[in-house]
Amino acid sequence: MGQSASQAHAFYSDVAKTGKVWTIRDECGFPAPLKSDGSRAQPFWSSLSRVEKIIKTVPAYTSFQPVELTWVVFRDRWLPGLEKDGILVGVNWSGKNAVGYDLESRSVKAAVEAQIELQKNA
């Protein structure tokens, strides 16, 4: 499993366990950087420690603050809004350039819900 796939799996599993999703914002709002293919993705992480590491180590994000969301709010409000706006979901971006998988909202929802079901039945 590659680094991005591993980070995505950790995102689904962690969010299913904790019921929390994290993003970042500054005085201008929430970032949704333009990618090389012309699409946009907003980053989300599965733990506060992951967010804090990105804020500390990625120069583009040093002025940002962590924002905690419940899974229910993320699922019911954020994912439909991101989809409507054509913005992908960046899951557990990592590394010095904060990169990882950028997925459609419905894929993220389905993957987390599948993990919730797995954990219920474990």
Image (cartoon, rainbow, N blue to C red):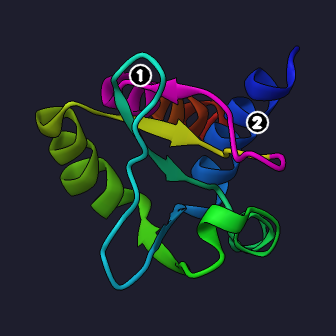
Q: Position of residue 52 (x, y in %)?
A: 74, 74
Can residue 122 be seen here? The reply is no
Q: Residue at x 38, y 49 (%)?
A: 32
Which type of secondary structure does the marked residue at label 1 adopt? helix
The answer to whether residue 29 is above or below residue 19 is below
Label disc, if present, on residue 7 of the rendered structure:
2
Disc 1 marks which amino acid?
A: Ser
Q: Nearer the viewer, residue 36 or 89?
A: 36
Q: Residue at x 16, y 46 (%)?
A: 81
Left or right of 81? Residue 57 is right
The answer to whether residue 98 is above or below residue 65 is above
Q: Residue at x 31, y 48 (%)?
A: 75
Left or right of 69? Residue 78 is left
Q: CA distance from mark 1 to mark 2?
A: 15 Å
Contact (Cβ within 8 Å) of mark 1 with mark 2: no
Q: Position of residue 11 (x, y in %)?
A: 66, 43
Q: Let me know if residue 37 is in the magenta part.
A: no
Disc 2 marks which amino acid?
A: Gln
Can residue 74 be seen here? The reply is yes
* Quadrant location, the C terminus: top right
Label disc, if present, on residue 107 of the rendered structure:
1
Label disc, if present, on residue 61 of the rendered structure:
none
**Residue stretch in magenta:** 95-110
